[in-house]
Image (cartoon, helix red, strand yellow):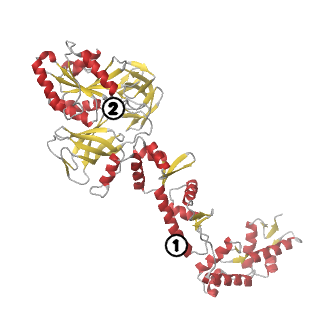
Amino acid sequence: MKHVIVGTAGHVDHGKSTLIRSLTGIDPDRLKEEKQRGLTIDIGFAWFDLPSGKRAGIVDVPGHEKFIKNMLAGAIGFDVVLLVVAADEGIMPQTKEHLNILSLLNIKSGMVALTKIDMVDEEWRELVIEEIREQLKDTFLAESPIVQVSAPQSLGLDELVKQIDILTEQSIARDTECDFRMPIDRSFPIKGFGTVVTGTLMEGSIKVGDSAELQPLSKKTRIRNIQIHGKKAEEAFAGQRVALNLADVTVEECQRGQVLAPQKLLRATMMLDVMLKLLPDNSRPLKHWDRVRFYTGTSEVLGRVVLFERDEMWPGEELPVQIRLEQTLVTMRDDRFVIRSYSPLETIGGGYIIDANPTKKRRFRSGVLDDLNLKATGQSADIIINSLKKENQLIFEREAAIRNTGLRDAAEAINELIEAEEIIPISIDSINYLVLSTKLDSVRAEIIKFLSTYHKKYPLREGAARAEIRSRFLTKASAKLYQQLIILLSETGEIYDTGDFVKLNNFKVEYTGKYLRWYENVIKKLQEGQFAPLGVNEMSEELAVKVDELKEILNNMLRNNQAIKLTENIYLLQTNYEKALKILVAYFEEHDSIDLATYRNLLNTSRKYALPLLETFDQSRITKREGNVRKLIR
């Protein structure tokens, strides 16, 4: 079933509250001061059943200019507006301001109730109706019905109800499938129950027992009880006036302007990117850094307007701007807002949120307005791609990307981008990630360039160590994430990951030119030295090869099992190592143990070489040292 809110609007003392009482039997003026003064000060609430069977909630707003901020808090939930105009006065200043506010809030449906018709003659009524039509001709109420009523005499009420029923039937149903969100407009304690808050459920649905979060306080709570129109309920839906009994929060924490939503849906902010339209009849331009009163949901916050490419904005203009707030609030992309001048208090414009959690932007910087216009009017997929590219990252958590864009259809747009291969999905330990294809291509090109230089500089190395590639190009990737990314990077066949090294696929280690000559000389020297080879430094001098280049050859021999490293300065040919091991094993055929001096003599070498050889056997668990001797591990 569709749930709707009908709201009143109009000048003070034009009969809004009286009309609601006549329609519903409920007095929307709940405050003692309101009853004493006969003046609506704060928003009031009622409900009634329509002929079609729908139950409509009613929000009655104050008409006095002093209470516009209260009117704004009530108007955010309107599906249909009832613009009330008194026949004896016609269109008045607050009628116009209310109409401007309703237009800025993008309310599309409504009608006019011409009240107090019993106080004027028919000719006067016709003149007032003509004036109303003239004033409404360029508004969303241009073609709306005008119903003549007298609440005290019950004239025209049946026709009014009929027209309300038609309009509510035609109104757009709210989304009840998305996450719930309810700006709070009242809070009070009830003895034995605790804190109760009321508001219009803007979207989604909520059940008794659901967890929620009070924002921007980030205070966790739970729904204990639900009431709708004075009756207990188990579930509430978008478009209903709701009273919620909350656990674990105080009345003081639940002030007007707070928002109730699922945990982590909303993030508090001190700035907003918005599309702002100034009213055409403003008396002066809006200047950069003007202080304004910013209204969205039930919040009122002071802030400053940042104009990006000019110093003034003229009446009737529409531009993307940034609002720097003086205290935190929460909102979402596409939410409507209104701004009023700080002094004098006048409604000057409004619009919709482009980005509810933006970064701080500098004035007169190239591309800022283009980005904002794309966010405001572009397709969701284009907005997401542009946003991800701006981050200059390769990989994003999917849920964070959805949350950060603020797009309600972000998940669907991301699926479109995956289908178009602009984004590649991967999953690690139940966390879903998104890889930006263009950034992947860019990183691949950078790695290929790096490896080309690396292979030229180190022609005897198999490639760059995995850790080096990760630290240079994939710094934020965990080991598991790196493994997935290197697979993606290797898909074009240009890069190959050996498990220990990353190299160009067409590269292989070959001894050519001077390296071949040096390699042959190293082999010769190690063969000549047998169990007492030249140290690295000595060999470097004798062969006239730099130590670093000599170590490149020796390390490549290690990788290819051509040599054994005994110490930082001593390398042994693999064949000589095997001979030394064979001599050791043969000795143990007739002896239980061997000491260093004995082994040194067997090899006809010095302690300098015999000791590291024995230590290498220990490390390989061939021998075990016991005191000054070693025994064979059998």
Q: Report whether residue 225 is seen.
A: yes
Please tell me how crowded label 1 is: few (under 14), some (14-19), or many (20+) other residues with Cα within 10 Å: few
Q: What residue is at 40 percent from the left and 55 percent from the top?
A: 390
Which comes before the other along the chain, label 1 or label 2?
2
Horizontal side of 369 relative to 393 (left or right) equals left
Q: Nearer the viewer, residue 529 or 321?
A: 321
Gap between marks 1 and 2 measured at Cα? 63 Å
Vertical comparison of 280 with 136: above or below: below
Which quadrant is home to the N terminus?
top left
Q: Quadrant of residue 198?
A: top left
Horizontal side of 574 relative to 285 (left or right) equals right
Kindly identify the amino acid type of the residue bearing the numbered disc 1: Thr
Q: Report whether residue 90 is seen.
A: no
Q: What residue is at 30 percent from the left and 29 percent from the top?
A: 78
Return the residue at label 2: 255
Q: Quadrant of residue 291?
A: top left
Front position among marks 1 and 2: 1
Vertical comparison of 396 with 350: above or below: below
Q: Nearer the viewer, residue 334 or 307?
A: 334
Q: Provide residue 524's location: percent of width, then percent of height.
A: 71, 84
Q: What residue is at 46 percent from the left and 49 percent from the top?
A: 417
Q: Provide residue 150's location: percent of width, then percent of height.
A: 19, 16
Return the residue at label 1: 453
Q: Provide residue 328's location: percent of width, then percent of height.
A: 33, 42
Please tell me how crowded label 2 is: few (under 14), some (14-19), or many (20+) other residues with Cα within 10 Å: some
Say what secondary structure mark 1 lies in: helix
Say what secondary structure mark 2 lies in: loop
Kindly identify the amino acid type of the residue bearing the numbered disc 2: Gln
Residue at the outermost front position? 143
